[in-house]
Amino acid sequence: MLTYFKLLATMACWGGTFVAGRMLAGEVPPFHAALLRFLLAGLLLLWLLLRSEGRLPRLSRRQLGAVTLLGLTGVLGYNAAFFTGLQSVSAGRAGLIIALNPVGITLLSALIGGEPLSRIRSFGVLLSVAGAMLVISRGNINLLPGGIGAGELMLLGCVISWSLYSVIGKRAMREISSLAAVTYSAVIGALLLLPLAALQADLSRVVDYSFVAWGSIVYLALFGTVVGFLWYYQSIREIGTVRAAVFINFVPVFAMLFGLLLLDEPLTPTVLQGGVLILTGAWITNNDGWRLRKR
């Protein structure tokens, strides 16, 4: 039960990142925001790692390669594809495409992760994805009439990046702790983001950011990264990649709820209908996994 609570709390944290990101829009360049988020998160995670394990774990060459891949996929790859795609794709279309994350994780886990994909579990995942599409698209599912352009392909890169990050992360945690994996990937990701941020705009501008901007960055680092990533990885270890990934569909629900509370955005019947589908799909997926373990 604690694992599922952590997963829901994680999705709430990630839903809040959309509000924090909107508060940064127009003031902080995208790669500056990403760099500051993971730089601050990396420092916090290093402190937690030292406090928890008493030292920085030494990594073998294979382990270093794994956490480097995590930094490349979940930090650099995802952010680069996300912000580049949004230059030419509207928020609604982008949200619909990124809602395919659980599908990507499920398929990748079935192909290389060794996790069985039963018919009922597949149905649960697809039902949750349908709910996420309904929420993000506000009932207008037909958002892709014009084909797929470069922006859409970049956003599909987000799906690939996050799917790889989730599956690689589970393998990396077989030999190192989830805290060490998240810490090293955040630090490596920040180092990889540094040249992109420097190319995008003068880094000295960070001293001029407003209190609201810095508050949003702190939220992104603390709750969107440190708490969110750690609890997500711990949940993957407990219940598996596929069943943890289906909860990602709760993110747009929380984003809409926080938008209502903090940005005065309307809560429509479509959001409620999509939430029912998401909850039902999550229950079907996890109930199937429970029955498999009981046999």
Image (cartoon, rainbow, N blue to C red):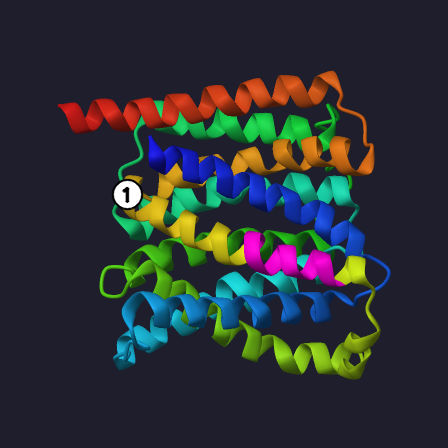
Residue located beneath label 1 in the image: 238
* Badge count: 1
Where residue 183 sits: x, y (%)?
43, 68
Q: Residue at x 75, y 23 (%)?
A: 267
Task: Give the image quarter of residue 173.
Answer: bottom left
Where residue 42 sits: x, y (%)?
51, 70
57 is higher (above) or lower (below) than 22: below
**Can the viewer see residue 87 in this picture?**
no
Q: Residue at x 48, y 28 (%)?
A: 126
- The chief SS type of the magenta part is helix
**Can the viewer see residue 257 in this picture?**
yes
Q: Residue at x 28, y 81 (%)?
A: 61
Residue 218 falls inside the magenta stretch = yes
Image quarter hosting the N terminus: top left
**92, 7: nearer the viewer:** 7
Q: Amino acid at mark 1?
A: Glu
Image quarter hosting the C terminus: top left
Q: Residues within 10 Å of mark 1 (few under 14, many from 20)?
A: few
Task: Give the image quarter of residue 238.
Answer: top left
**210, 148: nearer the viewer:** 210
130 is higher (above) or lower (below) than 220: above
Callout 1 secondary element: helix
Q: Residue at x 76, y 20 (%)?
A: 268
The stretch of residues the image draws in magenta is 214-224
Where residue 56 sits: x, y (%)?
33, 77
Where residue 76 sits: x, y (%)?
57, 68
